[in-house]
Amino acid sequence: MSARNRYLMGPPDFFTVSYVINPWMEGNIRRTAPDRAQAQWQRLHTLIQGYADVELVAAQPGLPDLPFVANAGLILEDKVILSRFMHPERQGEEPHFEDWFSAHNYTVYKLPPQIPFEGAGDALLDRGNPWLWAGYGHRSALDSHGLLAKWLELEVLSLRLVDDRFYHLDTCFCPLQDGYLLYYPPAFDELSCRLIQQRVPADKLFAVSEKDAVNFACNAVNIDKVVLLNRATPQYVDRLQEWGFQVIQTELTEFMKAGGAAKCLTLKLNEPRLVAAAPSIQMAQRQIQLEGHLLDANLMSRVMDTITSDGGSFEILEFIAGPRPQDTSRAQMLVTAPSQDRLEQILTALIDVGARLPATETRDAELFPVLQKGVAPEDFYITTIYRTEVRVKDQWYPVQGQRMDGAIVVTETPEIQVQCCLLRDLDLDQQVVCAGPAHRPSLARPPP
Ligand code: ARG
């Protein structure tokens, strides 16, 4: 007999709509009825207590959205990745959630301040497979996904959200026990829909109607074979029954005025790891160089818009402005995309908006020998979980045995082999890829 599931909830004592950070809140400022909100929350609380233990985080004046505890963080086993809220209106919740997690013996991981991530609202563990579905595009940055994969040692599948109404992944996507999954396809871009369809067999995947989606039917709490939600159509209920689930509807209309419902009001506290999986992520990165009238012709802002509107993100590594009107400017950027295909698509789009991308990757990797056993040469290229290729004698070679924080060893015996190696395993005279003076993969790149 497995232990009872545990959930966190936050009483809505100070719940109201006092600002607008999602489209549901528009027109609803102070339009919530506190008594009705309390009654709806209590009913949900009582229902969940029928199937699981519920713990509480104290309500706080001035933090009206705190009952949406799904956004506290992302839990796996004894680790939690604390949320970094996108909007200042919710950032005051972070210390309260941190205190709660610390007091309950979780190891708390914190993202760098410039990387927004909204916890289990945007990152949902699959319920039949050892991977994490992670949303980005509204509240969480794509750049958070690499860290989720690294810290939780899990495969992360990035999904891009494109409809403002479905600003958190849990508003339009719901993994159910045994690998079933509900989603509202128009909330995602095409490539994300394709990824979902590739990973979930058709007979386990249900595309909900818009009517269900706007009633927060994807925002469901799934405890074993029970699914609790605000409201659903008969088609939805029938499909779930065919799959062996019991659907329980409980009105949460007061919370919908703030843009949330059942799932947002809960956070599952016990999240066992399904099967130990190697950390991996489909994300791809490429360092690019831009040249031209980047400022005066407004090219730079078009480039940045193109990257983000095509689902990527970027970091400007260097910007050298041409000092006179006739001079061109130069920028080095690191472009990150959720997959290799998407990266190629972004690079093509950049050329279409007029960016020149002089090749930066025409050099062979610089190699230096190991001079002391177990010690990498200064400035060696430190591996990431991103799949990487290394250029040796004008050819690109995939890195074998790719893992985090290793070095890359190149051997010619006589055919060329490129192998990831733990630092402690480095041997005298082995040739190690070095990073060169500046930043990241100008010498190593993800494979095409
Ligand atoms: N008003 C809250 C916000 O916009 C609602 C959060 C709903 N939470 C969720 N996990 N979808 O942040």
Image: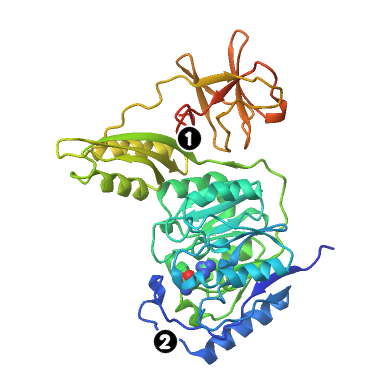
Q: Is residue 139 above or below residue 33?
A: above
Q: Position of residue 307 (x, y in %)?
A: 35, 45
Would the CB of label 2 be found within 8 Å of ligand 1?
Answer: no
Q: Is residue 2 above or below residue 388?
A: below
Work out whether residue 177 or residue 355 is closer to the camera in this orientation and state it: 355
Q: Quadrant of residue 83?
A: bottom right
Would the CB of label 1 be found within 8 Å of ligand 1?
Answer: no
Please indicate whether residue 90 sits to the left or right of residue 273 in the image. Answer: left
Q: Position of residue 364 (x, y in %)?
A: 46, 19
How many numbered tags mark residues here? Answer: 2
Mark 2 crowdedness (10 Å alpha carbons): few <14, some 14-19, many ≥20? some
Q: Which mark is residue 30?
A: 2
Most distant residue in the left direction? 326
The C terminus - image quarter: top left
Residue with the mark numbered 1: 440
Whether residue 216 is visible: no
Q: Residue at x 39, y 82 (%)?
A: 28
Q: How is the image coloured?
A: rainbow
Residue type at mark 2 is: Arg
Whether residue 164 is visible: yes
Mark earlier in primary sequence (2, 1):
2
Distance, label 2 to label 1, CA atoms, is 49 Å
The N terminus - image quarter: bottom right
Q: Residue at x 57, y 84 (%)?
A: 40
Residue type at mark 1 is: Arg
Tag 2 secondary structure: loop
Tag 1 secondary structure: loop
Most distant residue in the right direction? 1
